[in-house]
Amino acid sequence: MRLFFLVFFGLYGGMHLYFFVRARAAFALHPAASSLLAGCLLLMTCAPMLVRALERRGYDEAARLVAWPAYCWLGFLFLFCSLALPLDLYRLLVRCAAFLLKHDPSAILLTVRPLFTVAAGGACVLSVYGFFAARDIRTEHLTIASPKIPASAGRIRIVQISDMHLGLIVREARLARVARLVEEAHPDLLVSTGDFVDGHLDGATGILALLRQIRPRLGKFAITGNHEFYVGLDQALRFTRDAGFTVLRGEAVNAGDCLTVAGVDDPAGNRTGENPPQAERPLLQPLPRNRFILFLKHQPRIDPTSAGLFDLQLSGHVHGGQIFPFTLLTRLVYPFPTGLTRLPAGGSIYVSRGTGTWGPPMRVLAPPEVTVIDLVHG
C-alpha cells in the first residue's frame, strides 16, 4: 500500500509539474501568478490524501466535498497529459525534421499557446463526456453452453457486478440504476467480483435497502477486491454481508442442483497481512467434476495450477482502463482483455469493465456494465 501511494503521488506530482510548465510557457505568467498556480497545483496533488484522511476520521461530508473537485481534476489532468504529450512529441519531431532538412518549420508547427489550449480544451470536452458516460450503465449478455447444465434445468441466469466502489462518490443514485438493471434481468444468482466497498458506509441505510431488495433464488455471493483491504476489511465485510451477500474467502458453496460457486480473496490481503495466501488448487480440485464450477476471482489472472479446474472464472479489477488511453496500460499488465476468453485447458474467463468508477467519476471509451450470463445445456 505504501509503495502504491509512493508511485501514485510520484506520477501524479509529475503530471502537475508538466501542467505547470506548459501553462507558464503558454501564457508567460507573472511570478505572482506562477506562485499562485503552483500553490493550487500542490494543493490538488495532496487532495486525494486529504480525502482519505478526512474519511478515516469520520468527517464524511467534508471528505465528499473535497473528493468531487479532487477526483474530477484528476481525470481532467490525466486527459490533458494524454493529449498534450503527443502534441509535444509532434513538435519535437517537426523540429528534428526541419533541422535535418534545413527548412523553416513555422508553417506546420503549433506554437506553445495553441498547443496548451487544444490540450486543455480537449480534456474539458472529454471530461464532460466521461462524466455522463460513467452513468450510462450497459447490460452485456452472453450465453455459455455446458453439458453440466441439465436440459431439465432450462436456463440458469447469473448477473455479475464488479468494482462498484461504493463510497464517497458512488452512492444511492448510481446504485439505484444498477439495482434496476439487475432486477430487470431476473437473475437466479447475483455475484460481486470485488471492490464492492471503497469507503466508510456506516449508516448508509439507503444503500443497504436497495441491495437487500434484490433476492435471487440461488443467492448472492461476493469476494474481496484490493480496495476492501485498503478501506478496512472488517467494515467492508460487515457492510457486504448486511447487504445480503455471502462472502467467499477461499470457500466453495453449492447453489442449486448443478452449480458450485467458489471464491478467493484478492492478493492485497497478503500484502496488508490481513489474510494468509490462498492456494486455488486445493480449493478447486476436490470439487465434483459433474457440477458447473463458477470461480470468482477479482484480478483477471489464471493460476497455472488451477487451469482446467473450473468452468467459468468471473473477474474485474481493470475497469476496461476506465479512461482511455489507460486501457492500453491495463492490456500490458493483465493478459486477458475485457469480455469472454476461452482457455486452452478448458473453461473460460470473463473480465468485466466494472460497474462503478474509482477516482475520477468518469469513463472514456470504457462504459460501465452489468453482465448477464445465461448457462444452458449444450
Image: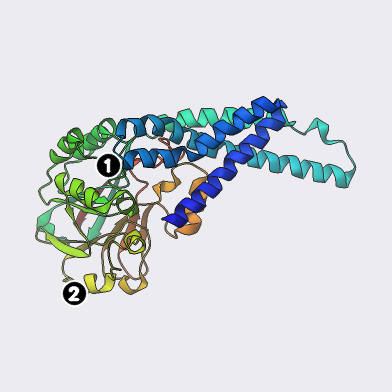
Q: Secondary structure at mark 1?
A: loop
Q: CA distance from mark 2 to mark 1?
A: 37 Å
Q: Residue at x 58, y 42 (%)?
A: 15
| Left or right, residue 274 beside residue 9 | left
Direction from residue 43 to residue 37 in the image, left or right: right
**Residue 267 in view here:** yes
**Residue 148 visible here:** no
Query: How many marks overall?
Result: 2
Residue assigned mark 2: 286
Provide residue 43's location: percent of width, then percent of height.
51, 35
Identify the residue shown where x is 13% and y is 51%. 219
Secondary structure at badge 2 equals loop
**Label 1: which residue?**
200
Residue 237 horizontal/vertical position (percent):
21, 51
Q: Quadrant of the N terminus?
A: bottom left
In the displayed structure, would residue 371 be above or below residue 226? Answer: above
Identify which residue, 257 or 150, lies in the foreground.
257
- Pick the front one: 42 or 253: 42
Residue 129 location (% of width, % of height): 46, 30
Which is closer to the viewer, label 2 or label 1? 1
Q: Is residue 100 above or below residue 27?
A: below
